[in-house]
């Protein structure tokens, strides 16, 4: 009887030990990888180099400096290599699922009365045409550029309300017959459309060529397709100086300031005292949007 009780006790003890082993944290079966040297905002990293940040190891996909690991999702330069040193098993920050620095909720907050034509999906689809937009420099710079673009867009469209230029009397004026390709869609077909109010036959031709879309013969696509509309806005923002000395994209990523984006879009009419009320409207909207995104507005706001 004593032997039977002893055997029963040993069996119970083995069962308890077995359960305890099963309940041990997974980390005890295989410790997390050692952490690489901590990420430094002033250091330069090239493709393949690693750094640790917030309990994870990260590997640079290409040259980078001052781009925080784990904050820009699929668009980011850093690839998550997993937890290290017993750190958390998920990245500490969750970027918007689109990969854009502006979430859909923030977009809706910026444009509460927008026309249903202007969609967040249309905007994020357009980003693929210019992947450097709001994806260059530090997280702060990325958000500042996004805020700057959206502030100017808001000003141009009354808060993303207007799809086409409201003054129809101007429509016939946007055909430059001196261009060799003329105005095949008609004398009055090249009026302002979309978030930057793209106008003139030569701008439709240039934007269409850059985007691989025939906008010279079919300018109406800009008012019919939300993604095409946003693409034309990003085309102008990223490639055209307008009356300024630099593109709006370069103005934001190189630290020239928001005022230079106004120059690029409508500086000849608004800057140098031309229309201070319009300039103030753009600046105020930019300040509101940077506040929504949680970043400072920066210097050189006016033109």
Image: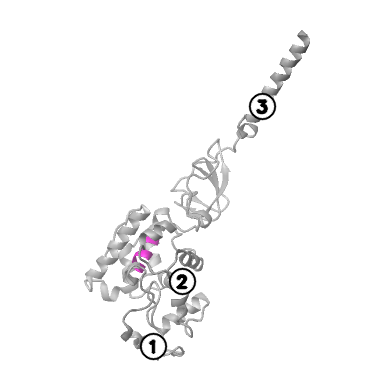
Quarter assignment of residue 293: bottom left
Q: Residue at x 40, y 66 (%)?
A: 249
> Of all residues shown, which one is farthest toward the top?
2
Which residues fall within the magenta stretch?
Answer: 146-153
Q: Mark 1 and mark 3: span between their CA atoms?
A: 80 Å
Where residue 21 sits in the image (x, y, percent)? 66, 27
For label 2, the residue is: 226
For label 1, the residue is: 188
Q: Mark 3 and mark 2: span between their CA atoms?
A: 58 Å
Q: Is residue 139 above or below residue 213?
A: above
Q: Is residue 139 above or below residue 31?
A: below
Q: Is residue 264 above or below residue 85?
A: below
For label 3, the residue is: 19
Quarter assignment of residue 23: top right
> Badge 1 local density, few (<14 within 10 Å), some, or many (20+)?
some
SS for dot 1: loop
> Badge 2 local density, few (<14 within 10 Å), some, or many (20+)?
many
Return the disc, 3 or 2, that comes first in the chain's sequence.
3
Q: Residue at x 74, y 12 (%)?
A: 6
């Amino acid at each position: 009887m004593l032997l039977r009780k002893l055997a029963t006790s040993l069996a119970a003890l083995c069962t308890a030990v077995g359960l305890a082993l099963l309940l041990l944290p997974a980390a005890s079966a295989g410790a997390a990888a050692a952490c690489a040297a901590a990420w430094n905002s002033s250091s330069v990293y090239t493709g393949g180099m690693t750094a640790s940040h917030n309990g994870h190891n990260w590997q640079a996909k290409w040259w980078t400096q001052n781009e925080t690991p784990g904050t820009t999702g699929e668009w980011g330069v850093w690839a998550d290599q997993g937890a290290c040193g017993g750190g958390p098993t998920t990245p500490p920050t969750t970027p918007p699922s689109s990969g854009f620095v502006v979430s859909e909720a923030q977009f809706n907050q910026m444009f509460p009365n927008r026309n249903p034509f202007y969609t967040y999906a249309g905007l994020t689809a357009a980003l693929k045409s210019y992947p450097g937009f709001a994806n260059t420099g530090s997280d702060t710079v990325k958000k500042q550029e996004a805020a700057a673009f959206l502030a100017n867009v808001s000003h141009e469209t009354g808060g993303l309300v207007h799809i086409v230029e409201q003054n129809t009397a101007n429509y016939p004026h946007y055909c430059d017959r001196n261009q060799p390709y003329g105005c095949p869609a008609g004398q009055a077909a090249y009026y302002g459309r979309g978030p930057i109010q793209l106008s003139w036959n030569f701008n439709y031709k240039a934007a269409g060529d850059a985007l691989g879309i025939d906008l010279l013969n079919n300018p109406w696509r800009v008012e019919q397709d939300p993604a095409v509309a946003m693409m034309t806005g990003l085309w102008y923002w990223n490639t055209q100086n307008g009356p300024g000395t630099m593109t709006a994209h370069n103005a934001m990523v190189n630290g020239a300031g928001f005022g230079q984006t106004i120059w690029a879009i409508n500086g000849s009419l608004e800057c140098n005292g031309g229309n201070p009320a319009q300039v103030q409207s753009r600046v105020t909207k930019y300040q509101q949007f940077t506040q929504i995104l949680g970043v400072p507005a920066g210097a050189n706001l006016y033109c």
